[in-house]
Image: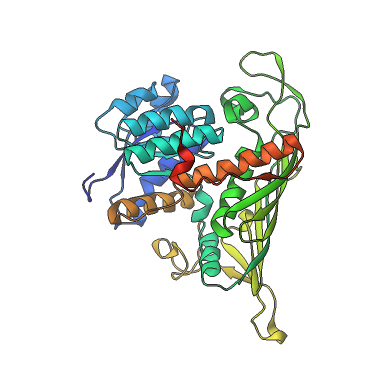
Amino acid sequence: MPANRSLKIGLVGTGFMGRTHSNAYGQVRRFFPDEAGAELVAVCSRDETKAREFASQWGFGSHETDWRRLVERDDIDLIDIASPNDTHAEIAVAAAQAGKMVACEKPLGRTVAEAKRMVEAVERAGVANMVWYNYRRVPALALARQMIDEGRLGRIFHSRFKFLQDWTMSADLPQGGAGTWRLDAGVSGSGVTGDLLAHCIDAALWLVGPVAEVSGTSEIFIRERVHALSGKPQAVTAEDASLFLARFANGSLATFEATRFARGHKALFTLEINGEHGSVAWDLHDLHRLQFFSHRDQGAFRGWRSIHVSDNDHPYMKAWWVPGLQIGYEHTFVHQVADFLAGLRTGEKRVPDFRDGLAADAVVEAVLRSARERRWEAVEDVSSPATLEGAA
């Protein structure tokens, strides 16, 4: 792709994630003018009416009802997969084999085996790729990563990650179908472990390091739901709650918790990391603030401080408004597109890529296995090319 030409996008999916991605592509050149920008060429949905209306609303030049047509088109550089989890592997592999760049929503695959096939495909084809773990692009979390890299926390001992929701507590809510496919494990791969905890796991891998072993438990509180497609009651196999303990390769310990049965919480994503010299804490509901404690401060003035991450010398913030004004959830996707475009321009590796998505999937699978077997489970090391043997 010529250095100064806009990245030509073919998007699969017209749901919530499709909206966030489309907004990011449309905004990136306005706030990151050094990058080439993106052109919304075509969007795909199996529902022709939805595809046509989405294309009109978000500024796509055309629409399709079969994702294979996007892959075949010569006027598209990147296939962006924002469709349900059971479509990820097939679309990604086909796109890579056609020489397209690939972006994919999380989790990368429903299983490690699926994710390995996807990694093998993009690496064999040599095409640029990314997974939409957008919370890495929250400026406050990017600042936390910077502080950890600078040694401000020192050796890490503990971390805690939570993601709490309450939207599936009604027994009248169906499973499956367009709006509730996340409750159908056949489509999603798992329940909250691969959905909510996947964000926590990716953040942990990025901020703390590789996970060595896990011990997990899970629960399905409502054991039967009507399936939206058949209209008949069906056993639920996607877990409503998932908790696990983790031991990292660096020797630190962590707790993880996710549920859709925490009444009063819509999207409570929090984390805290404790080190030898200091600690950081963050809350999605206050996403522009990073809480920081430094034991190196003078004793009389030692205490938690709240850093308002909105100044020009904070990650990403120079691109936006004047110091003191904050940004939100949607901006994290703009940052990810900007970083991806910068990687194409400079040739530098940008993460999270499919390898990172595979690493998160390996932890998810170990947690599910541990909950099923009721024992500690080692997390597969998927960092080397040898781990893909037999993936195709």
Q: Is residue 143 left or right of residue 77?
A: right
Residue 76 to residue 142: above or below = above
Residue 24 to residue 188: above or below = below
Q: Residue at x 62, y 58 (%)?
A: 286
Picture coordinates of residue 77 (x, y %)? 29, 37
Q: Residue at x 44, y 69 (%)?
A: 312
Q: Quadrant of the C terminus?
A: top left
Picture coordinates of residue 84 (x, y %)? 52, 30
Residue 54 visible in the snapshot: no
Q: Is residue 57 left or right of residue 183?
A: left
Picture coordinates of residue 132 (x, y %)? 48, 44
Picture coordinates of residue 230 (x, y %)? 63, 13
Q: Residue at x 38, y 38 (%)?
A: 122
Q: Is residue 240 left or right of residue 347?
A: right
In the rendered view, how is the structure colored?
A: rainbow
Residue 241 to residue 290: above or below = above
Q: Is residue 143 left or right of residue 65?
A: right
Quarter location, residue 51? top left
Quarter location, residue 102? top left
Residue 178 visible in the snapshot: yes
User: Across the whole image, how many numbered discs are drawn on residues?
Assistant: 0
Q: Quadrant of the N terminus?
A: top left
Residue 107 to residue 187: above or below = below
